Every structure is written in structure tokens, then in C-alpha cells.
């Protein structure tokens, strides 16, 4: 199977509403999700959840590990539970084929070589502030709609996904600086974004200025 065929197969899995809900349930969790939790979250039986979760693993959309949920070890501790989390790989396809990633890398290289970091950050901040949703009260919903997968870590709002992962891995200082400026533009007065990387996620975290959050 070619890479393109594999991508079509993986994305085709998400065409099924139930599998898409299960995938979203696992992907939204910063840790790992067990079969029982996934079944409860989607309102289906454990056996049905297990079947579809394993299909998502076969497609390369999820990955698995095993651990004892009770925390006990040794005889009588029970069998380790199968846990699921979002796979690290990315899947994208366009019809007809396009190569936006190549253009993005080229533009990033030019900006970095030209020392235009501040200009990029200023443009990103302005773009965030000009976004129609920038003044929205529910910043969490705004970030979720843009693929950041926000979640609370205590009172800190962390972002489980970096929408710019490919470029951020290659140009970390440039892209992370741009990302922070963009989120600063999007954020309303109740939130304070700062560079505080989430393991496996986004480089930006937000602290609430409102004690009720």
C-alpha cells in the first residue's frame, strides 16, 4: 500500500460517525484512555468500543500501551488494561494533490534567514486580534475550533495539539514565537498566554486572570 493509499484508508475510518467520536474522545485526552472510559463517553458497550478502537489502531490513528489501572502489582493485581492514545503521525490528503507543506517550509526558511521573526510575530498578533472570534468570551471553544485541543491542568489551560507541528519541529523558535503571538491576539483580557510547552502538545499555555476558571 502506498503512503497515499494508507492516508485515504486512515481518513476513511473517520467517515464512520462512531469511530470518529471514539477517535475524538481519545485525541482530546492529554493522557491515555481505556476501553471502559471510551465506551462510557460515547454511550456504547465496552466490546463495541474495543472493536472500533482496535480498528483505529490498525489504521495508524491510535496507538496502545498496557498498564494496571489499580496501581497494584504482583499476584492478584489483575491483568493490565489496554490503553489508547492518539498516534503521533499526521494524515492529510488533497484532491487533486497539493504541496502546501513544501511552500510553508520554504517561506519559514526565508523568514528565519532574513531575521524577520518580529515582523512575523507582529503579523500573527494582528491576525489573531482581527479574527472575528477574538472577542469571544469562550476562548476555550475558539482554541478547540482551531485544533489546539485545550484542557485544564489545574488552573492552567494547556493545549494538547500543535496545529503547526511539522513546521514547529523544523523551525521551533520561529513557529513557536508566531504561535504565541497569534494566541495573544486571539486571547481576551481574561487570559494570559505564555511559553510553557505541554509534552507532546503545544508550546503555549494560558493562565486565567479570573479566579472562577
Image (tube, helix red, strand yellow):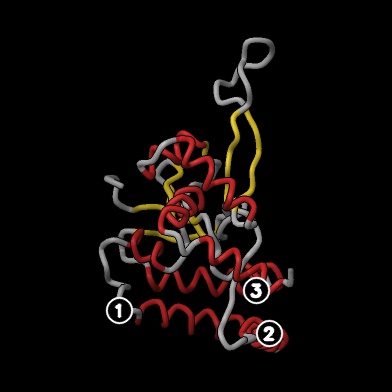
Q: Which badge, 1 or 2, comes first in the chain's sequence? A: 2
Q: Is residue 167 above or below residue 90?
A: below
Quadrant, the N terminus: bottom right
In front of the other: label 2 or label 3? 2
Disc 1 vs disc 2: which is toward the camera? Answer: 2
- Disc 2 secondary structure class: helix
Q: Nearer the viewer, residue 96 or 90?
A: 96
Q: Are marks 2 and 3 in contact (CB under 8 Å)?
A: no
- Using the image, determine if residue 97 lies above or below residue 170: below
* Residue 16, image x, y percentages: 45, 60
The image's mark for residue 102 is: 2
Whichever of labels 1 and 3 marks the residue nearer the N terminus, that label is 1
Q: CA distance from mark 1 to mark 2?
A: 29 Å
Lower position in the chain sequence, tag 2 or tag 3: 2
| Residue positioned 58% across, 70% down in the render | 164
Nearer the observer, 161 or 181: 161
Q: Say which residue label 3 marks.
A: 167
From this viewpoint, which residue is outermost toward the top?
75
Q: Residue 141 lies in what quarter of the image?
A: bottom left
Residue 130 placement: quadrant: bottom left
184 with respect to 11 (left or right): left
Residue 134 on image: x %, y %: 32, 73
Instruction: Estimate the x, y position of residue 53 in percent, counting from the top left.
Output: 54, 46
Mark linked to residue 132: 1
Amino acid at each position: 500500500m502506498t503512503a497515499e493509499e494508507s492516508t485515504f484508508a486512515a481518513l476513511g475510518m473517520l467517515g464512520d460517525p462512531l469511530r470518529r467520536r471514539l477517535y475524538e474522545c481519545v485525541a482530546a485526552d492529554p493522557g491515555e484512555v481505556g476501553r471502559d472510559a471510551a465506551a462510557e463517553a460515547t454511550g456504547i458497550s465496552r466490546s463495541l468500543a474495543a472493536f472500533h478502537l482496535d480498528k483505529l489502531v490498525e489504521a495508524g490513528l491510535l496507538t496502545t500501551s498496557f498498564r494496571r489501572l489499580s496501581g497494584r502489582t504482583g499476584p492478584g493485581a489483575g491483568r493490565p488494561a489496554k490503553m489508547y492514545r492518539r498516534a503521533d503521525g499526521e494524515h492529510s490528503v488533497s484532491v487533486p494533490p497539493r504541496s502546501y507543506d513544501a511552500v510553508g517550509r520554504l517561506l519559514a526558511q526565508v523568514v528565519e534567514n532574513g531575521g524577520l521573526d518580529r515582523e512575523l510575530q507582529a503579523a500573527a498578533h494582528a491576525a489573531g486580534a482581527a479574527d472575528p472570534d477574538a472577542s469571544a468570551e469562550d476562548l476555550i471553544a475558539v482554541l478547540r475550533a482551531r485544533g489546539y485541543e485545550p484542557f485544564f491542568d489545574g488552573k492552567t489551560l494547556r493545549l494538547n495539539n500543535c496545529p503547526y507541528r511539522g513546521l514547529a519541529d523544523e523551525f521551533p523558535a520561529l513557529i513557536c514565537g508566531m504561535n504565541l503571538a497569534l494566541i495573544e491576539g486571539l486571547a481576551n483580557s481574561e487570559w494570559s498566554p505564555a511559553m510553557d510547552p505541554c509534552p507532546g502538545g503545544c508550546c503555549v499555555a494560558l493562565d486565567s486572570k479570573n479566579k472562577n476558571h
